[in-house]
Image: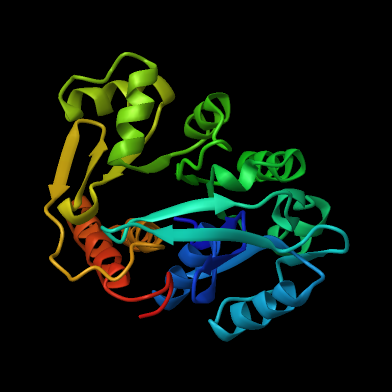
Amino acid sequence: MVSRIISIGETVWDIFPDREVLGGAPLNAACHLQNLGRDVSLISRVGDDRLGKAARHQIAALGVSAAGIQVDEHLPTGQVDVRLDEHNEPHFEIREPAAWDNIIYAETEPLTAGPPFCLLFGTLGQRGAVSRATIDSLRHRAELCFYDVNLRPPFTIRKLVEESMAASYMVKMNEEEFLKITAWYGFNGRRREEAGQQLSQRFKIGVLVVTLGAGGGWLLSGNEFVEHPGFTVKVVDTVGAGDAFFAAFINGFMAEQPWAECLSAANLLGSEVAARPGATAL
């Protein structure tokens, strides 16, 4: 199996009322994959500004190569205003435009011209036309694609989600996203195994993974259905927990572990991140 992973998309600063935290699903996942011993590269774009310089410095400090971080002379580094509700669930306001909307394909060549790779990407990173075209080009070159749905209205166009699912071997979403997407095709209201089967068959998804927050998660691969109840922790904030979950799941998959072990490891890492402040702090 191909061992190299490229994670591509948004790099943002999560702006909380009392702090600024570097984040973005591609970075969060890359950081955890790196910690798990995987050969992972991050491709994104930041502005030539204070937050951009700080992002490149902190990415390197996290142990993730900053070689794939492009610098935009005109657009600012991405920022997301984060508000936690009474249940510690995050709500996001994503500023636009941002440098990560303008990831240039030609500038990815130093990282993508080497050995074969798997591509990890999401929906939000395709918000801008330039980045969307770059990700689409890399999808066609990747051996396998791992797609984290991460719906962030109003930047989640149905056609884009459908194209991304159709291009990917592995698709991860949370329960709310699963219910919304299956409702698009009239699959909602059915048993989750049946709805998952129909969604997987429609888009030829090899592995469908659905997270349930504190309730764990489940997966469907062919006719095999596996679920895990999750781990009980005191939640501090859930920002980045889904990214950690997916990173651990991909790691288990690439290590050719049984699905039950992949799901258990994913739930464990996701719960550990939810029990701590910040998306990558462990």
The residue lying toward the viewer, choosing from 200 and 211, is 211
- Residue under the image location 63 percent in, 76 percent down: 65
Q: Residue furthest bottom?
A: 61
Q: Which of the 4 image quadrants contains residue 12?
A: bottom right
The residue lying toward the viewer, choosing from 137 and 115, is 137
Residue 71 sits above or below residue 177 on the image: below
Q: Residue furthest top?
A: 186
- Residue under the image location 68 percent in, 80 percent down: 54
Q: Which of the 4 image quadrants contains residue 78?
A: bottom right
The residue lying toward the viewer, choosing from 227 and 273, is 273
| Left or right relative to 263: residue 4 | right
Q: How many numbered discs sit on the rendered protein?
A: 0
| Left or right relative to 199: residue 94 | right
Residue 112 in percent (x, y) is at 69, 58
Residue 156 sits above or below residue 203 on the image: below
Instruction: Give the quarter of the figure containing the N terminus.
Output: bottom left
Residue 11 in percent (x, y) is at 62, 62
- Residue under the image location 28 percent in, 18 percent down: 187
Residue 129 sits above or below residue 10 on the image: above
Residue 192 in percent (x, y) is at 19, 29
| Left or right relative to 46: residue 14 | left
- Residue under the image location 83 percent in, 53 percent down: 106
Q: Residue furthest right?
A: 73
Residue 177 sits above or below residue 260 on the image: above
- The coloring applied to the image is rainbow
Residue 17 in percent (x, y) is at 49, 70
Instruction: Give the quarter of the figure containing the C terminus.
Output: bottom left
